[in-house]
Image (cartoon, rainbow, N blue to C red):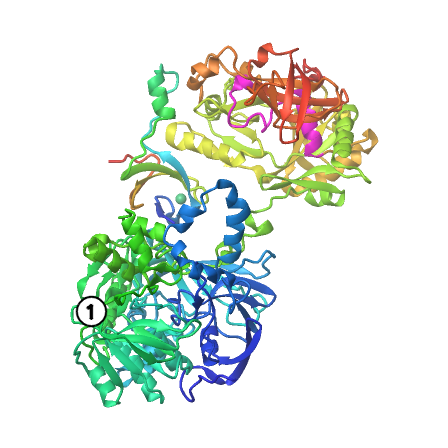
Amino acid sequence: MTQAFRVENVGLINRDKKLSFKFNGKKYFGYEGDTLASALLANGVHLVGRSFKYHRPRGFFGAGVDEPYAVVQLYRNGETEPNIKATEQELFEGLEAKSVNCWPSVNFDVGAINNFLKIFLPAGFYYKTFMWPKSFWFRIYEPFIRKAAGLGVASTKHDKERYEHKYEYCDLLIAGSGPSGLASAYAAAKNGAKVILAEDKPRFGGSLLTSDVNIGNQSGKDWAEGIIAELKTMPNVVVKNRSQIFGYYDHNMLVMSEKVSDHLPATKKYHPNKRLWYIRAKEVLISSGSIERPIVFGNNDTPGVMLSSAAKEYLKVYGVLVGRKPLVFTNNDSGYETAIEFKKHGVDPIILDTRKNPKSEIIDEAKNLGINIKNSYVVVAANGYKKVKSAHIASISEDKKQLGEIENLQCDCICVSGFWTPTIHLASQSGNKTKFKEEIDAFVPGQSKQNETTLGAANGVFSLEETLKTSFSVGSELSKKLTENDNEIAIPNVVEKKSSQHDKFWCVPLPKGKHYKRFLDFQNDVAVSDVEIALREGYRSIEHVKRYTTLGMATDQGKTSNLNGLQLVSEIENKVVPAVGHTTFRPPYTPVSIGAIVGREIGKHSKPTRKSPMHDWHEKNNAVFVDAGVWLRPRYYKRGNENLFEASKREAKNVRSNVGVCDVTTLGKIDIKGPDAAELLNRVYTNAWLKLPVGKARYGLMLREDGIVMDDGTTTRIFENHYHMTTTTAQAANVLSHLEYYLQLVWPELNVNVVSTTEQWAGAAIAGPKSRDLLQKLFPSSDVSNEGLPFMGYIEGDLFGVKARIFRISFSGELAYEVNVESDYGNFMWEKIMQVGEEFKIQPYGTEALSTLRIEMGHVAGSELDGRTIPYDNALDGLVSKKKDFIGKRSLQRSAFTAEDRQRIVGVVPLDKKTSIPEGSHLVKDDKAQLPNPKLGHISASCWSVEYDNPFSLAILKDGKNMIGKKLFAMSPLKNKVIPVEIVSSHYVDPKGERVRS
Amino acid sequence: MLYINCPHCGMRSQNEFSYGGDASVKRPELNKEVSDQEWDNFVYNRKSLRGKHLELWQHISGCRQWIKVERDTATHEIFRTFKADEEVA
Ligand SMILES: [Zn+2]
């Protein structure tokens, strides 16, 4: 069977290009220009999936974004994507798709038992049932629900596709290329405005592609093509198809997802799969059209029941008949247009019109064509399980309450039209308080919230003539305001058939003794009875009804269900619809690929990677790197089969016995200049700074206003009014903002300038007893003796022709120096140090050895300065000036901060001198105490002391001052360890600090 | 994403800025006696108000200036922006 439902010579598809594709493993053919839905329908396939809750067979209901349930799992080029609407997916050669929501197969589905047990699955069923007993959730309910429900399966593989983000600014952003979008875009473009026109479908023109109208003596479709062709030639216009504007955010920022490659078998080289546009528009025109509304009747979810506009689109755009014995069920003239198209292509439809005696040009045309029309008639229920076989129909009384005798009418599809619902999602997302328009029983945008204007059908205007007139003039006026051009546009004459008033009827009553399911929300399986239950159980607010029943939720966002749901609530509650109000429309309007949202920010692209100028050297010398913020730092340099522990021990030992060199480029550096520089330092640091001489460095401690330590580091007076501040790697950016905050806002009278120079300097720390000998050889013309360059001294030196800054500062506790040169000379410096250092047995050391050295010296770092500690806690209270005021000083008087038993840093050694204590372990008095065992402190950092060759840790311990010599337990439930420990001084090595001064 | 008019650079997207909290808070002068209550009000106590709010932002990926922004916390409408040293009338 090949495309038995395709009609000759109709549609916009390319019949010269036949494409093969697979659905649920079976091979079919379609044409270029088809969607997966139109191609399947051309082959007579109506069964595409199972419904979410009851697993009822589901077919196609719409022909585009309005589709609530024809969702498939797509396979393309070795990738898979769930949640794809078959009505939006364009066909390509080799496409493969599978049904979702069915297990084991679409034709036999275990979950369909739910359908026969539906009496047990009413609204709120999940809330009520699966809550108890609790232990059942993980073992029984959840796995079953997971297997039985869902809208497809996400791939667990790495997505090879590329996604891009783009930022764009424009005068007018126009959402939708139907008549209102085209007219307003054209008028604005002619005035020279920068215009972006976005269309979610592959073809431009919106309703003009399927409506029988004339504009300027051409068919609507030809007129649309002409306008688009002209817009495309204009340099100030961007025209995008396959592009859905799905979100309207603050300050006229809209986000659009452009499908660049989804219609192709594989993404072209260097092309993205999708492109996400962040568009800031001065004016936004919403011309998103309207979606046909269903009429609710029994079994209205049977495959073969669909919107009449969809049936018309399948025929006029794709040349596909959705049935050969169509029944059109309508409450307005739109159903007639569909019936007329069927008739023109040799198919005899029957129209059931709920109205008694409607009169209009369209109806006359249908009558003249000899179409069978039954007035005051309704479909009571569709018959057939996997496809419509017939319909129970009946006449209906004038008050729409009494059904006549039920008749069975043979048909193979039921095309429904319950009038039109304007697509107001974007306006609502903008913050527009929508209003209810009685004449069309629907909400339309009210007062604009941001710079948005809604046009045409989206604004509830269904006359083409009026739409074009308004849209040309709005496009013209808005662009005139922005460009001051005023080019007059001749508005073309319009020929359209006038419609008659629709019938407000929306739900067919149940015949006596029948309990058909009448669905409101097709995606979420919400039936009339579910909403009735919710209201009976006391849910009143429409927002609560939505959550309890799931009406209007998920990816569909109530496109076809929203208004009928409101009608029902208003009827039961005896309120008018506007009093019920509608639920909030949330972005995205349609599902957006996670890949598109993430864009290029994946893996190493998720944040910048910063490397020091010596990075290549480290790499060549077997450095194993570690992430330090956004920096990559050598953790250790691997020799042979060494592991982290062995290598770091070797490196640390070599610092203690010979000399080591460590790349410290990553330290934050801030250049501070100005006559008030010393005063600024004096206010931001806890210690005194006014008397620091030129050529001297000082260690400083910075607090936040709440008294908590913010950062530490050394600052050096380079020249009279010139200081060089260093910060920790992690806090570099925050400290700069902190200084700028005080200089710009709090003390603008201070004449100081601060600028980050982190990247301008490469830094090498040279540490160990032989570091001075090495330094002397590096700087033969400088006096680096203990007198010439004392502890905390600073000189400038000449490193083989390169200007260098030499600081005598130490983090390792050894005699140590830091040499800085301009970044471009970083590698030169490093190589010279290694080369000259050879005779002193120099070795590079990484962050692990660095940690070991500072921990056993009791120097605090990030793990102690963790945003919870004050100077006292870190045994840095000696640095807190009693005389002067500084940032955060007043907070240190708080009673908790001055408590006698305040926490304080201590050293911790395991009693067996063998067992390393896991970082994060809690210190407790009694390891057998009842839980929760009172915590006295925690282990902040652990190392293997190279000085004593046993484990050593630092801890922040309650009343730490009086705990030295006490025995406690370090407990780590995570590592399942209980370790008896002794509390010692945090200064485990060289407690008097003699080495750094030697 | 908000669109903020930096008084130094012009209209820029929010992702160039970082938020700095209530701009009406005044730091007590240095070396002045401050009561516990006064200090707590400065460090901790903030009104989480709905409506017009004068707040600080730093144009961190631009001119690095701290600016004052008058914004409605409920609607995100931005009424005016000021330089750090500009008086807000
Ligand atoms: Zn700026």
Please say if A877 is above or below A24. Answer: above
Give, as a single range, the part of the protein colored magenta: A846-874
Task: State the quadrant of the C terminus of chain A.
Answer: top right
**Whole-percent x and y of residue A474?**
24, 66
Chain for disc number 1: A
Element at badge 1? Answer: loop
**Residue designated by label 1:** A402
Q: Position of residue A109 (x, y in %)?
A: 51, 64
What's the residue type where badge 1 is placed?
Gln
Measuring from the top left, give residue A314's x and y in whole percent.
Answer: 39, 78
Q: Is residue A608 visible?
A: yes
Residue shown at 40% from the left, 49% from the top: B13
Instruction: Say whether residue A39 is left or right of residue A188.
Output: right
Q: Quadrant of residue A46?
A: bottom left
Residue B15 lies, with reference to residue A765, above or below; the image says below
Query: Is A236 or A103 nearer to us in this picture?
Result: A103
**Residue shown at 73%/24% (left/top)?**
A915
Picture coordinates of residue A649 (x, y %)?
76, 29
Q: Is residue A849 magenta?
A: yes
